[in-house]
């Protein structure tokens, strides 16, 4: 073998090694996306209120018991955590499906209130088709486990988040599967004089969320477009090519929507220029003129 050929082989192996390392880093190197959201009606008591959003874990683990994820969140020390669905993967091939998230929650600091809305993988847990469960009660048992850990699952319902003597409203729109959102029929009308935060897995109904009266929406589902290209954005999602809401902060009149790029992968482990995402949103009050 000639020296020239040896150099070519060595160079090729070096490039392949770099690409393999980059690929695994993209799947496993956690990133933190920080956003500040200004809201006019935000009570002064919530100024600086810090929210961590997690989404689309799909049974992904970052260290044993998700210890790396736990450490990142504990270092952030949020005021609350919101989870926007698809934290497991709807397949009968995974034993004890959802236990990855349960273990993570058990390891997490118990001081953080956690609120959860489902994605299509929770709502269709072990389904034969999109409207029939494969195993009766599977989803319900999963939600009971979450509740036993202090997680509030918002199934087309709402709650009040209190800080000192001030309140904000938190709504949860569970994954609907049917494609028809019918948000007012499911959640009622929100207050016009208070801050209304909405958790909903799919970001593609941003206009409907805004018209309904959501001041801030947390969503996920798109996995950041899987492959993120400069000046173009995400390439592919469950809704097709070049998703409009691939990740980050979006505006629509008086509404703001934060879309997580997600933590895990489904159906294929692919993330390019699109690392697993912990979202941190800080609320700030906008002074009225």
Image: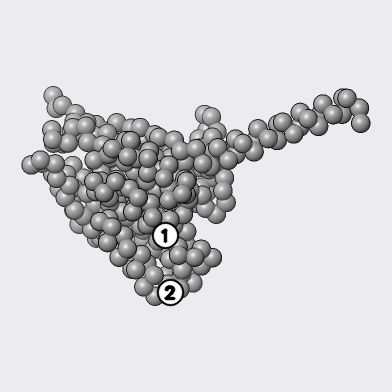
User: Is residue 135 depicted above or below 94 in this figure?
Assistant: below
Residue placed most toward the observer, 176 or 208: 176
In the image, farthest residue toward the left: 165
Which of the marked residues, 1 or 2, is nearer the chain's N terminus? Answer: 1
Mark nearest the camera among 1 and 2 is: 1
Which image quarter is the N terminus in? top right
Of residues 273 and 6, the one nearer the viewer is 6
Q: Position of residue 87 (x, y in %)?
A: 41, 54
Residue displayed at 41% across by 59% down: 99
Left or right placement of residue 275 versus residue 251 in this view: right
- Crowd rating for badge 1 (residues with CA inside 10 Å; few <14, some 14–19, many 20+): some
Query: Residue drawn at (57%, 51%), measured in percent from left and top?
Result: 268
Which sits in the foreground, 259 or 30?
30
* Residue 139 image position (x, y, % from top left): 37, 67
- Give the structural element (helix, strand or loop) at label 2: loop
Q: Quadrant of the C terminus?
A: top left
Residue 180 seen anywhere in this rendered image of the structure: no
Q: Which mark is residue 135?
A: 2
Give yes or no for contact between labels 1 and 2 (Cβ–Cβ under 8 Å).
Answer: no
- Give the SS element for disc 1: helix
In the rendered image of this protein, does residue 170 appear above or below residue 246?
Answer: below
Query: Which quadrant of the figure has residue 263?
Result: top left
Q: Which mark is residue 99?
A: 1
Relative to 192, is 131 above or below? Answer: below
Q: At which x and y percent is residue 33? A: 39, 34
- Answer left or right for 47 relative to 155: left
């Amino acid at each position: 073998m000639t020296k020239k050929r040896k150099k070519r082989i060595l160079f090729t192996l070096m490039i392949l090694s770099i690409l393999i390392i980059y690929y695994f880093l993209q799947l496993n190197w956690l990133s933190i996306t920080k956003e500040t959201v200004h809201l006019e009606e935000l009570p002064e008591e919530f100024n600086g209120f810090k929210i961590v959003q997690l989404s689309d874990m799909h049974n992904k683990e970052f260290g044993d018991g998700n210890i790396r994820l736990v450490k990142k969140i504990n270092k952030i020390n949020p005021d609350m955590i919101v989870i926007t669905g698809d934290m497991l993967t709807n397949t009968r091939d995974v034993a004890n499906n959802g236990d990855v998230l349960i273990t993570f929650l058990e390891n997490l600091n118990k001081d953080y209130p956690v609120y959860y809305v489902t994605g299509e993988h929770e709502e269709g847990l072990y389904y034969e088709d999109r409207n029939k469960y494969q195993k009766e009660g599977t989803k319900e048992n999963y939600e009971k486990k979450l509740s036993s850990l202090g997680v509030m699952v918002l199934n087309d319902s709402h709650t009040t988040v209190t800080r000192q003597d001030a309140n904000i409203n938190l709504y949860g729109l569970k994954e609907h599967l049917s494609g028809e959102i019918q948000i007012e029929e499911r959640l009622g009308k929100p207050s016009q004089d208070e801050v209304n935060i909405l958790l909903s897995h799919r970001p593609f109904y941003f206009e409907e969320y805004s018209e309904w009266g959501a001041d801030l929406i947390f969503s996920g589902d798109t996995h950041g477009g899987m492959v993120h290209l400069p000046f173009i954005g995400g390439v592919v999602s469950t809704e097709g090519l070049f998703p409009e809401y691939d990740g980050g902060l979006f505006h629509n009149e008086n509404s703001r929507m934060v879309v997580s790029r997600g933590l895990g992968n489904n159906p294929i482990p692919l993330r390019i220029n699109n690392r697993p995402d912990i979202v941190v949103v800080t609320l700030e009050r906008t002074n009225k003129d």
